[in-house]
Image (cartoon, rainbow, N blue to C red):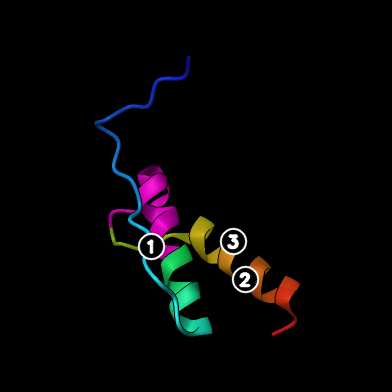
Amino acid sequence: MKFVSLTKPIAEPHQVHTYIELRQQIHDDLQIQHPEWVQPNGESPICDSYEARLMELLGT
């Protein structure tokens, strides 16, 4: 049986209508799931790297 921590924040799913919304949703979800990636100034180079990789894979 697998147990899920109830204290860890989770990303709430919502309907995405545009590519820009999808990118923002992914960025926000990564920051929620990995708060240790967010620097004190609010920047997140790891999230930015994931976003750049996604754009590269999508050919944009």
Q: Earlier in the sequence, mark 1 or mark 2?
A: 1
The residue lying at 33 percent from left, 27 percent from top is: 5
> Which structural element holds mark 3?
helix
For mark 3, does the 10 Å Cα neighbourhood hold few (<14), some (14 to 19), or many (20 or more) residues?
some
Q: Amino acid at mark 1?
A: Asp
Q: Which residues are magenta?
A: 27-40
Q: Position of residue 50 (x, y in %)?
A: 59, 61
Q: Quadrant of residue 27?
A: bottom left
The residue lying at 43 percent from left, 49 percent from top is: 37
Q: Determine the CA span between mark 1 and mark 2.
A: 14 Å
Provide the residue designation for mark 1.
28
Are the residues at dot 3 and dot 2 in contact (C-beta closer than 8 Å)? yes
Q: Quadrant of residue 55?
A: bottom right
Q: Amino acid at mark 2?
A: Ala
The residue lying at 39 percent from left, 54 percent from top is: 31
Q: Where the C terminus falls, by quadrant?
A: bottom right
User: So how many labels did they put on this image?
Assistant: 3
Q: Which disc number belongs to residue 51? A: none
Residue 44 vs residue 50, the one in the foreground: 50
The residue lying at 47 percent from left, 19 percent from top is: 2
